[in-house]
Image (tube, helix red, strand yellow):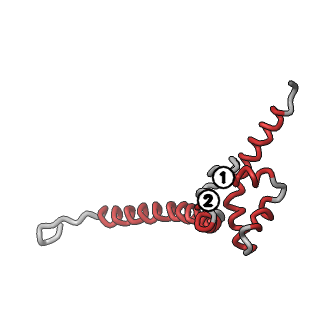
């Protein structure tokens, strides 16, 4: 005991050190997870965002933002592009800037593929035995 009526506990500094070590360990464990999340999340959406913005701004009025609006002849832009062997070149009829055209193609490509597959299935059913 000390002369002022307070007792000294030698475990107090060790507890504080242990709490600090645990806190720093938890922070260190979480940092790599946050860095990985920050690196992968923008990469997956960054490829389609510029193309979507260009498409929505220039083409969305007639074709909707996802290119699924029926046109006067009953088709959609997606159906037209799905039938084309080189849809990116087909986009050149309206989008003259090559970089913008490529960005729009990157945005539309995942939308075109299901349309292409459904057209293939319908074609195989239609050409089957009568």
Which sits earlier in the primary sequence, circle 2 or circle 1? 2
Circle 1 is placed at which residue position? 71
Q: In the rendered structure, find residue 62 and report the number of the disc placed on it.
A: 2
Residue 107: mark = none
- Is residue 34 among the parts visible in the rendering? yes
Circles 2 and 1 in contact, beta carbons < 8 Å: yes
Residue at the (68%, 47%) spot, across then down = 74
Q: Is residue 39 visible?
A: no
In the rendered image, which quarter contains the N terminus? bottom left
Left/right placement of residue 66 relative to residue 23 reads right
Q: Please name whichever residue, 40 or 119, is drawn nearer the observer in this view of the structure.
A: 119
Q: Picture quarter containing residue 103?
A: bottom right
Tell me: residue 21, above or below residue 85: below
Q: Nearer the viewer, residue 130 or 50?
A: 130
* 121 horizontally vs 73: left or right: right
Q: Is residue 108 shown above or below 17?
A: above
Crowd around label 2: few <14 · some 14–19 · many ≥20 (10 Å) = some
Image coordinates of residue 14 in percent, x first then y, are 35, 64
Q: Quadrant location of residue 88?
A: bottom right
Report x, y in % for residue 36. 58, 62
Tell which of 108 and 28 is nearer to you. 108
Q: Residue at x 34, y 65 (%)?
A: 16
Residue 61 in the image, given as x and y percentages of width and height: 58, 61
In the rendered image, which quarter is residue 92 located in?
bottom right
């Amino acid at each position: 005991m000390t002369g002022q009526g307070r007792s000294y506990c030698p475990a107090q500094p060790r507890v504080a050190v242990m709490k600090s070590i645990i806190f720093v360990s938890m922070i260190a464990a979480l940092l790599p997870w946050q860095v990985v999340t920050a690196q992968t999340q923008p990469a997956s959406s960054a490829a389609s965002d510029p193309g979507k913005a260009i498409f929505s701004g220039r083409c969305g009025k007639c074709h909707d933002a996802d290119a699924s609006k029926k046109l006067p002849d009953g088709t959609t832009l997606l159906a037209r592009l799905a039938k084309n062997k080189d849809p990116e070149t087909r986009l050149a009829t309206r989008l003259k800037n090559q970089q913008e055209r490529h960005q729009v193609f990157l945005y539309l490509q995942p939308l075109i593929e299901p349309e292409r597959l459904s057209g293939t299935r319908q074609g195989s059913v239609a050409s089957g035995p009568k």
